[in-house]
Image (spheres, grey):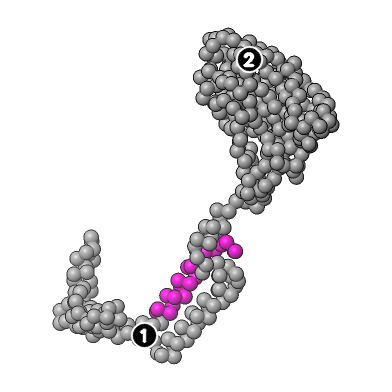
Amino acid sequence: MILLNRPAILGLTLFVAVCIGAIMQAAVGDREAQVAPDASTPAVTEPASAAAQLSDAAPASPEELAVTDVELTASAPQPIAPASPDTARLAATPQAPSAEATEAAREMASSLIAAAFDSLGGAADALAAPSDSIDMYRTQPPAGTQCAVLLTADPAPVAMASLTLDAPCHANTRVTFEHEGLSITEMTDDSGSLTLTFPALTTRATFNAALEDGTEVSAEVYVSTMSSYHRTVVQWRDDAMIELHAFEFGADYWADGHVWAETPGSRLAAAQGTSGLLTTLGRADIPAPRLAQVYTFPMEHAAQTGSVALSVEAAVTPANCGTEVSAQTLEYRPDAPLRVKTAALFMPECDAVGDFLVLKNLVEDLTIAAQ
């Protein structure tokens, strides 16, 4: 599509208007002007034929507009020299050009208009195109921005960040998110979008996202409630099948207070200080997955005093039996640097499929004081 600038459009419009005016002036010869002379005051009347051309109805009687009436509208009338009736009639009667002159004027105007449009080339087509087509062209994003990748981060309850990835040219694409050493993988949807809630590990939190083609974006958010919570993270790759378990205030397996993947708790309870929260990150159904679980407890506004026992467990599966798997833990405390530990696990042989390895000393228990 060719877009014309405003001066070109105005110039072409003026040129066409002049040509049309020439045609209309030539067409005046087809009309008859009628003059109704008066002995004392000349008068001008509207021709009946012109009135019939403007309306299908029967023409009304012509209304006489006396010259004296027109003069009364001037703020400072000037005296008019007397004129004879013959002189007035001659001045008021237009001289009609001959038929040959009229036809020649029309052909000349048509030739000028055609030449103007030919000189414009494709620009003339743009003038005849619907106006919304130009608007649609102007509202499209500039070249090179249709595939721009954008990551945004907003604060969320319980010292978390709400991440939104927009990658319109990366539908169903593997994405690796990284934050303070915590790394997990996710997948965009059919439109190239992805939204997830990510537990923060520092007050001024920076999150990075890397796509399969090497594109990387980052976002930063300030997490004002970070000091109110303690966090314990365990992360692994591939088929390690690691689990993080929290036993709050003496709870046993499957009882109230046993927080794990099947009973993760709620953000509302964590915000109120009545329970901890387990967040599972990453997707296991994509190639080379990176997965993590994060346990959050509201240390600064806990509703009761006691302790939380933490353990890391690894399930023996047909995919990992008889192999070595690795796991890494990260522990966040407001008054201490982030602690990182890495452990190598030698899984039992495949006749132990269905069993679990329990690693109780890989992470530290929590001592809770009611606030």
- Of residues 5 and 298, the one drawn nearer to the viewer in this rendering: 298
Q: Nearer the viewer, residue 294 or 320?
A: 320
Specify whether residue 292 is painted magenta.
Answer: no
Question: Disc 1 on helix, strand or loop?
Answer: helix
For disc 1, the marked residue is: 29
Badge 2: residue crowd in 10 Å (few <14, some 14–19, many ≥20) = many
Three-letter code for the amino acid on which mark 1 is drawn: Gly
- Say which amino acid is labelled 2: Val
Relative to residue 72, is residue 4 drawn left or right?
A: right
Q: Secondary structure at mark 2?
A: strand
Looking at the image, residue 242 lies above or below residue 361: below
Q: Position of residue 303 (x, y in %)?
A: 52, 13
Tell me the residue that label 2 is attached to. 308
Q: Residue furthest left?
A: 39
- Residue stretch rendered in magenta on the structure: 1-25
- In the drawing, what numbered circle is on residue 167? none
Q: Residue at x 18, y 71 (%)?
A: 68
Mark 2 / mark 1, whichever is N-terminal:
1
Q: Is 72 rendered above or below residue 30?
A: above
Residue at the image position 49 percent from the left and 79 percent from the top: 109
Q: Residue at x 23, y 60 (%)?
A: 75
**Residue 200, can we see it?**
no
Q: Residue at the front extreme?
A: 351
Q: Is residue 183 left or right of residue 129?
A: right
Q: On the image, which quarter does residue 246 sit in?
A: top right
Q: Give the image location of residue 287, x and y in percent.
A: 75, 42
> Quick check: 361 above or below 178?
above
Residue 326 picture location, percent across and down: 80, 27
